[in-house]
Amino acid sequence: MEDNVANNTSEQNKTGLSTDEFIKGLWRDNPVFVQVLGMCPVLAVSNTALNALAMGLATAFVLLMSNILVSALRNFIPKEVRIASYILIIATFVTVTDYAIQAISLDLHKALGAFISLIVVNCLILSRAEAFASKNTIGKSIMDALGMGVGFTFALFCLGAVREILGNGSIFDIALFPHNFQEWVVMILPAGGFFTLAIWLLIFNGFKTKKAAV
Amino acid sequence: MQQTIQAGASQDSFKMLRAMVGIGAFCGLLIVLTFEGTRSRIEKNAAEALERAIFKVISNTTKTTTYQLDANNKFIPFQKDVQSDFVVYAGFNEEEELQGLAIEASGQGYADIIKILYGYDPIKQEVIGFYVLESKETPGLGDKIEKDLTFIVNFAALDVKLKDDQSALVNDVVYVKNGTKKNRWEVDGITGATISSKAIAEIINQSAGQWMPVIQKNKAPFEYIEVEQNQE
C-alpha cells in the first residue's frame, strides 16, 4: 500500500502536474466540508448566492496568486521569515482584489464589507502556502490552488444558495416563490449560517461514510 | 570557528533582509499600480452611484448640479478646492426646472452609522424621497429600512415646514409605532426594526432642523450648470 503511494508520488513528480491535486480540493479535502477552514467568511457572507460566489472567487484568486508567488520564491525565502513573507504576499493580493471589486461594482463591495480585507487572515490561504506551495513546483501549486479555490467557492455557493432560497425566497435576486411565501428570516441571519453549514456537513459526511463502507 | 559562525549568521541575516525588502518592494509596487489603474474607474462608479441615488430621491430628475455653502452662508456651485460644511445636489428635469434638492445626512443606527440621502422640495417644504447610501443594519431585520415599501412611503411627502421666522421646524419629525401615523411629520416605524427606523426619523429631523432654515433663508437661485465631462 505504502509502496503504491510512493510510486504514485514519484510518477506525479515526473509528470509535474496531476489532476489529483485539483480533485482533492474539490472533494476529498474540501476546505469547508472536510477541513472546516476559513469559517468566518463561510458563515458571515453566505447570506445570498451572489455574495457567496463573489467571496469564493475573491478568495480563490488570492489563493491562486499567493500560491504561485510563494512557490516561485520558495528557494529565496529563508524559513525564519517565511510566515511574515507569506502574509505580506497574501495581504498584497487581498488589497489588489479589494480595488478590483470596487472597480467592478460598488454594490458588491458594500455587500461583502469588511470580509474582503479579512481574506488576509483566512487560514485556508496561509495553510496552502505553508503546507503546499512552499514545498512544490509552480505547476502543482497552481493545480492545488485551483482545486482548493473552486472547492471553497462551491461550498460557499452551496450555503449561500440554500440560505437565499429559504431566507429570501429567491436565488440571484430572482424570486422563486409566489408572493405569499413566508421567508425564513433566520436563514439569512448568522444563526442560519450555522444551521445550513451543519446540514451540509451532515450530508457530505454521510456520503463519505457510505462510500467508505462500500 | 567562531568567525565562521559569525560569518554564517550575518549571511543568514542578509538573506532574510533581502527576502523581506525584495518582497516588500514588489508588493508595494503592485499595490500602487493597482490603485492607479483602478482609481478613475472607482471614482466614476462612486459618482454614478451618487447620481443614481439623487435620481431616486428626486423624481423626474434627469440632470444634477452640486452646490455648496460658502463662508458667507451663500450657496455657490461646487468647487473641488473650496472647503464647505454643507453640500446639496440640485435636481432638474429636461427643461432645466428645479425639481428638488438632495441632501446627505448620517447618524447612529443599530449596528453602525447609517448614511442616507433624502430629497427636499423647497417650495412645498417637504421631504420627497429617501435612499440609504450606507448601512450595516442587521440583514432581514434592520435592513428593512432600505427595502420595506410601507416604510419608504413615509418619505414621499414628509412635512418639514419651518416656523414663520424660519428659525426651526414647526413640527419635529418623530417616530411613531407601526400603524399609528396620523400626521404628515410622523414616521411610521417598522416592527422588528424599531431602532433602525427610529434612527432614520432622528437623522432626518436633525438634518432638516439644521439645514432647512439655511436653505429657506438663502432663497438661493439654484440653476442647472452644465459641467464638462472630465476626460479620463
Image (tube, coloured by chain):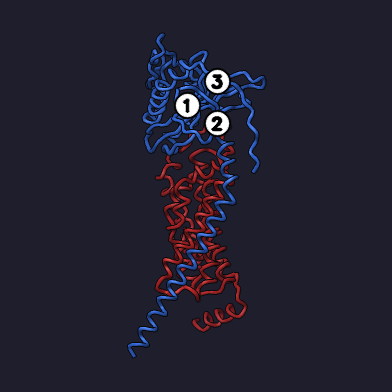
Spatial CA distance of label 3 from label 1 is 20 Å
A130 versus B29 height, above or below: below
Report the disc number at residue B70.
1
Q: Is residue A188 above or below residue B82?
A: below
Residue, x 50% and y 76% (percent of image)?
A75
Q: Which type of secondary structure does the marked residue at label 3 adopt?
A: strand
Q: Numbered disc 2: what chain?
A: B
Q: Is residue A157 toward the left or the right of residue A44 in the image?
A: right
Disc 2 marks a residue whose amino acid type is Ala
Which residue does the numbered mark 3 point to in the structure image?
Answer: B100
What colour do you see for chain A?
A: red
Give a yes or no on whether discs 3 and 1 share a subunit.
yes
* Side of B15 where A20 appears, left or right: right
Q: Is residue B9 or residue B159 the one in the foreground?
A: B9
Q: Are marks 2 and 1 on the same chain?
A: yes
- Please state which of the two labelled residues, at mark 2 or mark 3, is closer to the viewer: 3
What kind of element bears circle 1? loop
Q: Position of residue A204 (x, y in %)?
A: 49, 58
Image mark for residue B187: none
Name chain B's colour: blue
Q: Chain of mark 1?
A: B
Q: Classify residue B60 as left or right of residue A79.
A: right
Tag 3 near tag 1, CB within 8 Å: no
Q: Residue furthest front?
A: B72
Mark 3 or mark 1, whichever is nearer to me: 1
Residue underneath mark 2: B53
Three-letter amino acid code at disc 1?
Asp
The furthest residue to the left: B2
The three-letter amino acid code for the residue at tag 3 is Gly
